[in-house]
Image: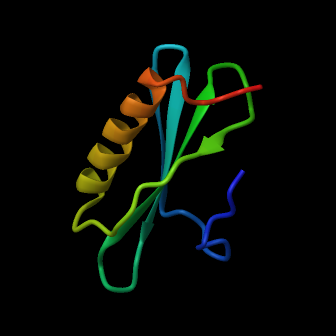
Amino acid sequence: MKRNPLFDAKPDVVEQHPEGKVIIEIEFYKLVNGQYKAWPYVKEAGRETKEHYAVAGEFATMEAARTVAIETARKLIAQGFPYHS
């Protein structure tokens, strides 16, 4: 799993969004400039292991960050993410 670049910080909010057999988990961080950063993961329901996927950029609102994180996850899930060997 990738390491969070904000590793010393605790997320301000953590949300889980079920999507079929997987769960999208999003950590939100409010930055000192007032913007939000999303650090999302996808995990299979019933499993503890989660896989990070990238969402680039900072967002004016948490809602904007959430929307991009979920839309990106849905595209990746359609392509078979999370990938397990």
Furthest-top residue in this view:
20
Q: Residue furthest bottom?
A: 32
Q: Could you say where residue 11 lies in the image, as x and y percent from the top left?
A: 54, 63
Quick check: 84 left or right of 23?
A: right
> Which quadrant holds the C terminus?
top right
Residue 75, located in which quarter of the rendered image? top left
Residue 34: x %, y % from top left: 29, 79
Q: Position of residue 5 (x, y in %)?
A: 60, 72
Looking at the image, which residue is at 63% across and 20% down? Answer: 45
Q: Relative to 37, say whether 21 is above or below.
A: above
Q: Is residue 19 left or right of residue 59?
A: right
Rendered residue at 25%/51% (across/down): 63
Check the image and report above or below for 64 versus 43.
below
Residue at image position (67%, 38%) is: 50
Q: How many marks?
A: 0
Image coords of residue 59 (percent x, y) = 27, 66
Given residues 31 and 83, the one toward you in this image is 83
Q: In this rendering, would 23 be left or right of 38?
A: right
| Colour scheme of the rendered structure | rainbow
- The residue located at (24%, 62%) in the rendering is 61
